[in-house]
Image (cartoon, coloured by chain):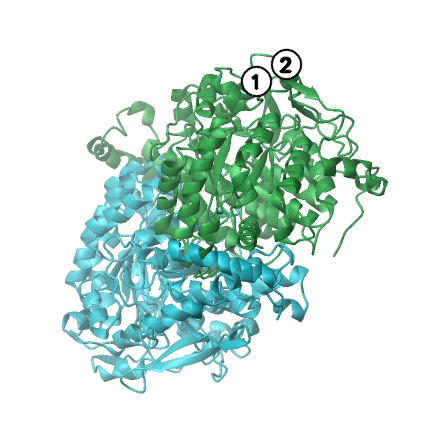
Chain colours: A cyan, B green
Amino acid sequence: MTTAPFLSATARVDAAALQTLPGSRKVYVEGSHADIRVPFREIVLSPTTTSGVTEENPPLLVYDTSGPYTDPEAEIDLRRGLPELRRGWIEGRGDTDFLDGPSSEYGRRRANDPLLAPLRFDLARTPRRAKTGKNVTQLHYARQGIVTPEMEFIAIRENQRRQALGSEEVERILGHQHPGQGFGTRLIDEITPEFVRREVAEGRAIIPCNINHPESEPMIIGRNFLVKINGNLGNSAVSSSIEEEVDKMTWGIRWGADTIMDLSTGQNIHETREWIVRNAPVPIGTVPIYQALEKVGGVAENLTWEIFRDTLIEQAEQGVDYFTIHAGVLLRYVPLTAKRVTGIVSRGGSIMAKWCLYHHRESFLYEHFEDICEICKQYDVAFSLGDGLRPGSVADANDEAQFAELETLGELTRIAWQHDVQAMIEGPGHVPMHLIKENMDKQLAECDEAPFYTLGPLTTDIAPGYDHITSGIGAAMIGWYGCAMLCYVTPKEHLGLPNKDDVKTGIITYKIAAHAADLAKGHPAAQRRDNALSKARFEFRWEDQFNLGLDPDTAREYHDETLPKDSAKVAHFCSMCGPKFCSMKISHEVRAAVFKDEADNPGLESDRETIERGMEEQAERFRAQGGHLYREV
Amino acid sequence: MTTAPFLSATARVDAAALQTLPGSRKVYVEGSHADIRVPFREIVLSPTTTSGVTEENPPLLVYDTSGPYTDPEAEIDLRRGLPELRRGWIEGRGDTDFLDGPSSEYGRRRANDPLLAPLRFDLARTPRRAKTGKNVTQLHYARQGIVTPEMEFIAIRENQRRQALGSEEVERILGHQHPGQGFGTRLIDEITPEFVRREVAEGRAIIPCNINHPESEPMIIGRNFLVKINGNLGNSAVSSSIEEEVDKMTWGIRWGADTIMDLSTGQNIHETREWIVRNAPVPIGTVPIYQALEKVGGVAENLTWEIFRDTLIEQAEQGVDYFTIHAGVLLRYVPLTAKRVTGIVSRGGSIMAKWCLYHHRESFLYEHFEDICEICKQYDVAFSLGDGLRPGSVADANDEAQFAELETLGELTRIAWQHDVQAMIEGPGHVPMHLIKENMDKQLAECDEAPFYTLGPLTTDIAPGYDHITSGIGAAMIGWYGCAMLCYVTPKEHLGLPNKDDVKTGIITYKIAAHAADLAKGHPAAQRRDNALSKARFEFRWEDQFNLGLDPDTAREYHDETLPKDSAKVAHFCSMCGPKFCSMKISHEVRAAVFKDEADNPGLESDRETIERGMEEQAERFRAQGGHLYREV
């Protein structure tokens, strides 16, 4: 096992995570108060030149998960953590107090252990908790009719300032957008803070934002918003160090992770998480049972409610934004998995199944679910109700065990809502394409439209090493059908712990799936980026094509493999077809021929007959000019 | 430009293409005659050991496109080409003659040019052609009620000997298969030679098998069979050599390419193709207009029917199995593309559009379509009716230009069928998910169920460098909806010419898409491989898990990155979760607890009540044994 020392004194941010993305600049859009500053990335484009006439291409504003890391004006120091963006908003509500120190026994023990000093994040402040009797969840505020700064921030963020450009102007420059097919999704043209509030109030969306994670930039998970993606990281007993995990976090958000789950099961779970939360501008999720199991030496049946409860408080006071809780694994469901091809494949699910079986009773997660709600509402930790019985193979998809648990997750959702605790529902797993929609439909029905959050699903089992792709297919489809957040799968799935490269591959694959889903749902303005990139491609603006892509670095590298020179970045061909066979180049000649005198012939495109009548004349002109209207730049 | 000399005297096969795949052996299933020997790959599996009882896992037979290259008994010599597997069948029909030599002017010129000797394949035989008045297409035979050896070969190949294992035995060992959803697909339990004949006769499937490509192993493309994939290769003026292209072919078929298209547009197109065809056990497709354009120095408007006709004959006599012909690009459709975001993105389409515009008349492809049929039926070259106006961006998907051309492709299909010439139809392109099904439905309706063959489609434009994934999503979906063959897209799409690595990535991605589609359609026995792999995974048979995957080498490499030792190949965990958190390991303990005495309790799994009654007793036993039923191997 490799554990590089991660010293509090010397921790340094991964330099690769600090570069601004090529052709991009960080911009902020202000809300109703100066402290609501919503970050975006603006991709600056070069102009289009046709026949000597130059037209500007407006910069494209894109949703930006990378936080201050890509802001050249920000001073990044992992040892100090990110600025407390939300501190004023939390304090302004007047419903929380600072504690004297961690109130969990384990948290206190770790804080006071001198041996841990070299790897401990030096947090100057103490944890915050709701005042007695107060509920500090966004769901609680929403139901009181309160529009929080978090909600306003999210409205601006989701809108991507798309009203700033009039739709006619956009259509002229960037082309139209296809109407979507949303399966009941309600996508509206302008997302208002009030719309955000209502979606949260009705349980259709959640805002994971623990009061002890004031560093996070508010985001929302719900099917009437942009589809989100999660990236998992975390060490195991076999591999990785704190430093590697922090690097995976900063690398993951650079490429688009909307949330990060820290699934560490190895050494120093508490300290690893502290470093991650303090430096994460996105919500952090965990599966607390992993750490609880560590505390009992890995013996599942020795787990107790008391140990688990202490773990929840420990993590809530560090700032974890959502907890995966496998409370739907009921004793009577366990035997339903015994004849499966792959049994129980959820780590949390298998731990709880073993516990239930050993003690022959329902789990403490289920029996103490309302106690867990009580903890969550004091910190605003959202539930991610875990699917402990999800299928681990195509054969086990949509079986009785899976759907029985889903029904229980629906019951638990309603209990969480009684406590004004936010909840989303986890979903599979391995599901062949034709059985995916049933998952989405059943989840919406059983869980009263609470957001769905699925792992893939993988659409076949036969490609270990490529499960980002087998699952990317399923993720795109279920995102289209209404899944609110897609949990990535990396190429290492089933084979080993992902490294930094795997994290990036997983993130990009899932950004593709999420965006493909937004397009298919018809999310307003989602197609703007596709149109801008395709226009750049057609106009041989190579740099713009790279920069508008999800991964400019790889696109450029692939292009330069055969044509590395700068001159190739304005060439009207690439190595795929070479200059004579470039369809786009020829297509420009065709277009020029058709439209040479469009100004003189305004009805040109109005119908085929008009076009045909105009064709002979144009053909003559084309021939007269030697068939070479096209000019090299 | 890099052109390594490829000398007739020294050509050598890529050693990487010759290894048998790990854990696999080449097997042949004989048909009704000894010369019908259908190749398969058999993946040999290790036994399952539970509580000291060992049960064999039957080897898995998989469809094998790799030809003799993976047969250790075959002698591979690129300079001699592959054995003429089909020679006897072709001669047995008595409807063809050998010519004195190439009958195309260009073919003769190349054959007689002494300067080309060093890079010319030394073909000892002359081309074959139908006797005067004969039609030698598989469609012609099928309509006469003749079941050819090619059809019998295909029936055996598609069946994968799935009747050999009784379904009860298969279910017991490998688990069930979900019923599929086929959108009108007719998948039958046992594919007979007569079924193959009928599908071909009715135009729903094609068997691309030029009489001058007797080296090819017959395969079928149709939606009532396994979904197939095509891999493109070919040089460009900017890059690559003959040797590299032959290596891409042998590499592509190793990983599962069902057909290969040689899209060369650079130097020595004729000689490159000869090397590829002579050494290809899969059908080869081309786009003859590319070479014709080379012959007129790249000036589209100088193309003539005579030059094109000579090119068709030249290529047909080399053994090309299918021709992409962009005869659907009509003059009146061209202006419909002028307002598109990305105009015309098909190379062939843009060439023909330019020609039509320049001459202001319909193309020679359209006007001479029946003459082309006359050529095709003398050699049995199938049509791949090209979609010259396919959308090159999400914005242009499903537009008037695209669908107008598709209607014309329907007309051309019926003309081809009047000549008993086989035809499939090419499709897009760039299409967002919710607009994909319309493509499939319209193609089936317009083209009377002729097979559809699509490029992707790409479901978003925003990920250059990852278009194998953006398109793999669309390919899986359209395969499910009924597309018969999926043309791969590599990571280099839009950026450069793919190299050997890119070819492999494209092929594996498309094997995933095709298999996911087979699963969703409910192709009989498609799920067997998923079940076998998942069973191996659950039983920690790591080697079997790797070997059952589409790419054993990469799976093993990823696993070994963190746990390289041999002992890790039987370990009951991997580096992802480590030993204590392996859900599958814990799941075995759960299963053991539930099923300890299944023999004494046969009703155990019959219903939940029975299970629950049995639980308390089992829990006691479990506790008595210390909760550690599980034993390390």
Q: Dot 2, how many residues are within 10 Å of its Cα: few (below 14), some (14-19), or many (20+)?
A: few
Residue lying at 42% horizontally and 29% vertically, measured from the top left = B224
Q: Is A66 situated left or right of B291 in this image?
A: left
Instruction: Determine the CA span between mark 1 and mark 2.
Output: 10 Å
- On the image, numbered disc 1 is attached to which residue? B149
Q: Is A89 situated left or right of B202 in this image?
A: left
Q: Chain ID for label 1?
A: B
In front here: A116 or A71? A71
Asked if one can make out residue B307 in the rendered structure from this viewpoint, the answer is yes
| Quadrant assignment for the N terminus of chain A | bottom right
Instruction: State which tag comes first along the sequence, 1 or 2.
Output: 2
The quarter holding residue A624 reads bottom right
Residue lying at 57% horizontally and 17% vertically, measured from the top left = B149
Indicate the position of residue B619 as horizontal and vertical percent values: 29, 38
In front here: A47 or B325? B325
- On the image, numbered disc 2 is attached to which residue? B92
Q: Which amino acid does label 1 sit on?
A: Pro
